[in-house]
Image (tube, grey):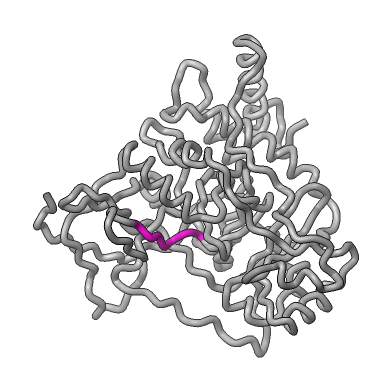
Amino acid sequence: MMRSVLVAIALAALALPQNALACVYSQRPEEVGHASGQYFAKEMLAAATYADLVLVEDDGTRAMDARPTGIITLRTIARFKGNSADRFTVFGNPLTFSPDKQRIFNAPLQHFTSETGQVTPFSYLEERPTLLFPRATGDPPPPPIGLTSCSPPALMAETGRFYVVLRDAEGRVLNRLTMSNGKTASPNHAAFGYVPVTLSDDDFWLWSVRMAAAAPQEAQELLYLTPGSDPVRVERDLRAAGATIRAAYYARGDFIEEVRPSPHEQTSPWLARAADYLAQSQRGRIGDPHHGAAEFLRQKLSPMQNYGTGLGYEVAQAFTRSVRDVQQATGTPRLIALEVAGDPHALAGQPFVSRIAPLDRELDRLPQVNGTDEADTFATMQRIERDIWLLNGGAGNRQGTLP
C-alpha cells in the first residue's frame, strides 16, 4: 500500500534559486532489485535506439584552473542495441577529482511502487546539452536550461570507468519513458540512461540490459558519402533540401568516431568545425583511461569469485580488445557518413550519397569468455588477466598499450 509519508527531496546540486520549492513526493522511493531491474531494462531497451557498454576516455577535466569542457568522451566497449560508433560524446560533468565520486558512483537505482504494485523509475541523471564547439563571435547563445526542483542531477562521469549508456533516436541519453499499467499508457517517466558498472554483488543492471538485448533490433540508417565529398558542399546541399544533420561519422582506419553537436548547434552549419574538434577534443585531458580501467578491473578478476554478475572477465575481454582497436586509430579522420533527422531515403537522390545503411558496426552483446574446453577457457582468462596487469603498469609498461 502506498505510504502516506511526504518526502521532500531538494536537489541542492542543481543550484536552484532560493525561492524554488523542493520537489514533494507522496512516497519514499525504494531501491531497484533484480526483478524490477529486469523489467526496467526490457522497457528502457525497447525505448532506446542505442544501448552500449562504454569506457569514459575523458570526463572533461582539464589542468590547473581551467574550466571543465562539459563534454564526456566515451569509447564503445560492447553494443547491445544499435550500431554506435567506436567513440562518441555526451554532455556532462567530471567526477575524476570530486570528493563525492564514490557516493555518486555507488548511488542505487530507485523506483516507486503504486498501490497496485506497478513500479515506475525514480529520477536518476540527466544529460543537459550545451555546446560541443567553442562559441564563435556572432554565434547566438544556447537556450537556457529549464530546471525545476524536480529536475534530476546532471550527468556525471569519471575517466577510466565503465557505464551502460542508453540513447534515444537523436543520440541523446535516454531520459523519457512511456510506461503502461495494463490499461493506460503514461509518458515522461524517468529512465536509467547512464548507469555506472560496479561489478559488485548488487550490480544487476549490466546483466539485465544484456539479457534484454537478446531480441533482434533495428538500426539507425545513415547517408554514406562518396569518397572525397566536400563537407561544406554536402552540408549546403542538404540544408537546401530541408535536412538537419544530427551527427557526422569519421573513420581513422577501421576506427569510427561520431561527432554529434547539441540540438542548438545543429540549427546552423557546423560540419566545417568538426575536423578541428576531432583534432583538439581530448588534448589536455587529465588521467589515463586505460590505467584507470585496468586498476578497477584488476580487483574484479579471480576465477574463485562470481563478481556479482559474473561479467568481470567479459568486460575485461571487451575492454582489452578495444584497447588494441584504438591503437590502430591513426591518421587523419575521413568523413564517411551523416545522420539526418527524418527519413534518409528522401535524400537518396543527392549526387554525393553512395548508399543508405546502418553504420558498419556489429552488435556483439558482450561476448562470453569461452574456449574449446575448460583448460582452453582458463588459458583465455589468464591471457585477459595478463593484459590487465600490463595496462596497470606491469612489466614497466607505462604507455597504456598492449602488444
Q: Is residue 14 magenta?
A: no
| 319 on left or right of 41 | right
Q: Residue furthest bottom?
A: 138
The boundaries of the magenta stretch are 173-179
Magenta stretch encompasses residue 177? yes
**Res. 65 visible in picture:** no
User: For the point 70% across and 37% down, which residue is it?
Assistant: 398
User: Seen in the image, is 26 located left or right of residue 246?
Assistant: left
| Point 61% across, 59% down: residue | 89
Work out whether residue 178 or residue 287 is closer to the camera in this orientation and state it.
178
Rendered location of residue 226, percent (x, y): 87, 64
In this rendered view, identify the residue nearer to me: 216 or 118: 216
Asked if residue 366 shows in the view, the reply is yes
142 up-or-down from 325: above or below: below
Q: Where in the figure is residue 20, as x and y percent of width and height?
A: 26, 77
Q: Position of residue 18 (x, y in %)?
A: 26, 78
Picture residue at 34% right of the left edge, 68% below the top: 151
Q: Quadrant of residue 140?
A: bottom right
Q: Which quadrant would the C terminus be assigned to in this image?
A: top right
Residue 229 locus on image (x, y percent): 87, 69
Q: Residue furthest left?
A: 4
Classify 122 as above or below 385.
below
The residue sitting at 55% across, 68% down in the picture is 67
Q: Nearer the viewer, residue 203 or 59?
A: 203
